[in-house]
């Protein structure tokens, strides 16, 4: 059903405040109508900052508002399952943050429920699928630039959320769904699946290299329960007797943030997504690399934070609002709940591989 106005309800005040609220404010036909947080005072502050009419004390209160049609679940991962289930049952469209859930069982329940509600949008916030240069890379891969895929490598070298200096918070808490694998590994897994195909099996090393972090409330050191380093090998499905391979390295301990990169090597060419948004391509083995990046017009919008996550979410928000206004619940390239489930299955398999010290077939 077509709608002139899409009422947005934000559940969370972290990324929701820094990137999602500014993005939706720029979308024609969108209106921020409600916000809630685990700390009510944060919801009040965000409501005041963005002139949002309703600062709610709970997500149940937000979901009860008739004027909210699209819910953005930007709370910690342990809340993704109960909130998304409640939102879908309340008749709302849903954008759920990654990782989708705490485990594949929760993700499967969410996916099965979403499948019974075809008139409601249900997607995962893998916003990098909406970045212009990332889409350009996928177009080249789909168009045969690489030829037969030989191997890929992915490096995510972050110093943001998990650096050794960060204080203890829910990111350090296993029961809340913290950890680098869920936070950024989910993006790497989704990008691999989106660009190169299904991951068939994994072999991993998952570690906590910073054992304690300072509790900002007490000043005492507190156990860090979650991973801040992960590396894993991947195997893709065989094609005509050929098996492609990959290696992924995730670390949150780079002092200056490090450098992110995706490299894909095939029988015809090589693509390198260097530093997140510079795309380089070379045909054959002796040809020089040429830049193939695309400009991102979101860089010209002053209220959008100058980072790839915020700019990419702006594009996701704009395409989502446009689709809902036109009565569509499918968006090209968007990660569906089914994609989120498969990603969660890979995450679970990576954790199991570390525990059992062997290759794990996805879904085993």
Image (tube, rainbow, N blue to C red):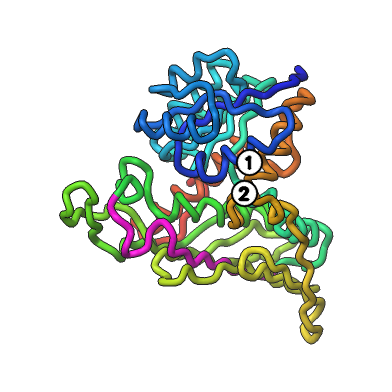
Name the spot of residue 230 as percent of width and height, x first: 42, 62
Are circles 1 and 2 on residues that touch, CB within 8 Å? yes
Q: Please count the marks in the image.
A: 2
Name the spot of residue 59 as percent of width and height, x first: 44, 23
Name the spot of residue 179 as percent of width and height, x first: 38, 52
How far is the residue under mark 1 from the one under mark 2? 7 Å
Q: Quadrant of residue 105?
A: top left
With 349 as the anchor, is 141 left or right in this view?
right
- Of the pair 66 and 350, the residue shown nearer to us: 66
With 321 as the anchor, is 357 left or right in this view?
left
Q: Please provide the residue range marked out in magenta.
A: 150-168
Q: Quadrant of the N terminus?
A: top right
Residue 33, magenta (yes or no): no
Q: Is residue 17 above or below residue 200?
A: above
Residue at (79, 76) in percent of width and height: 290
- Of the pair 24 and 130, the residue shown nearer to us: 24
- Of the pair 267 and 50, the residue shown nearer to us: 50
Q: Earlier in the sequence, mark 1 or mark 2?
A: 1
- Of the pair 27 and 154, the residue shown nearer to us: 27
Which structural element holds mark 2? loop
Residue 157, magenta (yes or no): yes
Mark number, residue 23: 1
The answer to whether residue 105 is seen in the rendering is: no
Q: Is residue 307 above or below residue 70?
A: below
Residue at (20, 53) in percent of width and height: 222
Mark number, residue 304: 2
Residue at (75, 20) in percent of width and height: 4
């Amino acid at each position: 059903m077509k709608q002139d106005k899409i009422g947005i309800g934000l559940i969370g005040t972290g990324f929701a405040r820094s990137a999602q609220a500014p993005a939706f404010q720029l979308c024609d036909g969108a209106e921020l109508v409600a916000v809630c947080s685990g700390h009510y005072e944060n919801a009040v502050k965000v409501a005041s900052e963005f002139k949002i009419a309703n600062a709610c004390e709970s997500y149940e209160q937000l979901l009860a508002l008739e004027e909210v049609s699209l819910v953005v679940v930007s709370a910690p991962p342990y809340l993704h399952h109960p909130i998304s289930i409640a939102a879908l049952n309340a008749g709302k469209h849903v954008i759920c943050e990654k990782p989708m859930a705490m485990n594949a069982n929760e993700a499967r329940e969410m996916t099965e429920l979403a499948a019974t509600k075809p008139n409601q949008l249900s997607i995962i916030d893998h916003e990098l699928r909406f970045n212009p240069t990332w889409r350009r890379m996928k177009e080249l891969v789909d168009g045969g630039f690489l030829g037969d895929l030989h191997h890929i490598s992915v490096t995510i070298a972050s110093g943001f959320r998990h650096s050794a200096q960060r204080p203890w918070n829910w990111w350090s808490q296993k029961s809340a769904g913290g950890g680098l694998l869920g936070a950024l590994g989910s993006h790497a897994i989704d990008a691999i699946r989106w660009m190169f195909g299904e991951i068939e099996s994994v072999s991993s090393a998952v570690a906590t290299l910073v054992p304690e972090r300072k509790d900002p409330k007490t000043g005492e050191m507190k156990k860090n329960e979650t991973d801040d380093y992960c590396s894993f090998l991947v195997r893709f499905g065989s094609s005509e007797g050929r098996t492609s391979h990959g290696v992924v390295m995730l670390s949150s301990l780079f002092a200056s943030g490090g450098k992110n990169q995706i490299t894909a090597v095939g029988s015809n060419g090589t693509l390198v997504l260097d530093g997140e948004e510079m795309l380089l391509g070379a045909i054959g083995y002796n040809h020089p690399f040429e830049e193939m990046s695309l400009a991102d017009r979101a860089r010209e919008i002053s209220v959008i934070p100058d980072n790839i996550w915020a700019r990419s979410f702006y594009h996701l928000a704009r395409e989502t609002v446009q689709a809902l206004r036109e009565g569509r619940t499918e968006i090209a390239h968007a990660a569906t709940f089914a994609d989120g489930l498969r990603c969660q299955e890979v995450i679970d398999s990576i954790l199991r591989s570390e525990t059992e010290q062997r290759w794990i077939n996805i879904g085993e």
